Amino acid sequence: METWIDREEKTLLNTYSRMPIVISRGEGCYLYDEEGRKHLDMFSGLAVNALGHCHPELVRVGKEQLERYLHISNFFYCKQGVMLGEALIRRSFPGKVFFTNSGTEGVEAAVKYLFKIGEKKGRRGIVSLEGSFHGRTLGALGLTKIPSVSRNFPTMNYPVYEISRETLGELEALFIKFQPVGIILELISGSGGIEVLAESDMNKISKLCAQYDVVLCIDEIQTGIGRTGKFFAYQHYGFTPDLVIFAKAVGGGSPLGGIIVNQNIDGYFSPGDHGTTFGPNPLGAAMGRKVLEIIDDDFLSAVSKKSQWMQEGLKELQQKFPESLGEIRGKGLMMGIDLKVDPSVLKAAFMKEQVLINITAASVLRLLPPLIISKGEIGKFLTVFEGCLEKLQ
């Protein structure tokens, strides 16, 4: 009998290396396959399902919106989009919002906005950080400095100046020489291996941006909406960005993204400069409002507590298996562990125990569990992790 996996291979373009699991449903922190087996999900749709699978409040709000309308186009005012935009501004800084369907489209919007600023100021070019992942569309790809992603695809004919964490001391000279209009950064690199920008480095960058009139853009696609224990990761630092890019968790599982433009750089887009058929997506915006309502200060405090439990358990495993585990990095429930064992073998061992993990940057275990994960579920993950490491000795 032909399986779903066989049918996909015949039907869909081969662009993903999938796990050999066909999912039938999700609930909380678990995914269920077609055989009815229950799998603990430790990367939650790559940080999309921050509130887990089929959160009852999101399901309720989604159904209510479906009964009103699903799409009206951008020729009409969308109340849900306005209310979500207001909520995002309250959780960030005074400014304005543009909604997209995804993170990479948010990056595209940011690039176009920077271009418009540059036109007015007579400046060109964007600075990006080595090892960054900003998306797969051609404009965003020019800022994505990961060889396995960018490869030899064409990119936009617009200057992009790359700098590494090791050469951040040269940033001022770069600003003086090339006079870029903006810089786009991940504070914690998602696909780049969960590398965290030091607060001292980020504060220097923000001061240089202010000194040389460079627009400071923070990519919060993966780090935002509570993932790090703050609503946005930049709130761990001592600065306010000029522009934030958000996506993933904001729509509660529905495709949604966008940018927040600080009021100090408002006014560079006019009707016709940019747009999208599905933005704002009424369903995603309605669910997003509920996401922001649930992820309040108490919720964020709980994320930080869960992070502490996770870090303590991981450090114990690191001490017990120093030949298998290297550095542990991250903030909140966005963590990376350098692996000294074969990642594919470890991933298979976890799957055998019905725990789903993600590997990034070739050898980094990336943990992005639902933010609703319980202490017991963290304990289950750590117990399985210990068992897998023992088997690999």
Image (cartoon, rainbow, N blue to C red):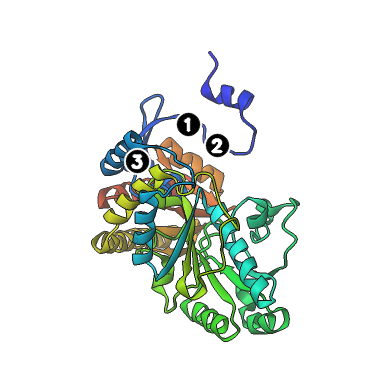
Q: Residue at x 53, y 62 (%)?
A: 189
Give, as a three-letter code, the residue at label 2: Arg
Which disc number belongs to residue 298?
A: none
Q: Earlier in the sequence, mark 3 or mark 2?
A: 2
Q: Position of residue 173 (x, y in %)?
A: 68, 84
Between label 3 and label 2, give the one nearer the viewer: 3
Which tag is nearer the camera, tag 1 or tag 3? Answer: 3
**Closest to the observer, 33 or 171:** 171
Mark 1 falls on what kind of element?
loop
Q: Please say if 200 is above or below 236.
A: below
Q: Residue 18 shows which numbered tag?
A: 2
The answer to the question of whether label 1 and label 2 lie on touching residues, with beta carbons closer than 8 A, is yes
As measured in the structure, the alpha-carbon distance from the residue carrying label 1 to the one carrying label 3 is: 17 Å
The answer to the question of whether label 3 and label 2 lie on touching residues, with beta carbons closer than 8 A, is no
Q: Residues within 10 Å of mark 1 (few under 14, many from 20)?
A: few
Give the camera-side residue of 22 and 344.
22
Q: List the residue tagged with mark 1.
A: 21
Residue 37, x across and y down, in percent:
36, 29
Farthest residue, direction bottom = 211
Label 2: few (<14), some (14–19) or many (≥20) C-alpha neighbours in 10 Å: few
Q: Amino acid at mark 3?
A: His
Q: Secondary structure at mark 2?
A: loop
Few, some or many residues within 10 Å of mark 3 (<14, 14–19, 20+): many
Furthest residue toward top: 1
**Camera-side residue of 55 and 26:** 55
In the image, is residue 13 above or below residue 171?
Answer: above
> Residue 300 placed where, x, y %?
29, 62
- Residue 122, picture quadrant: bottom right
Q: Amino acid at mark 1?
A: Ile
Q: Dot 3 corresponds to which residue?
A: 53
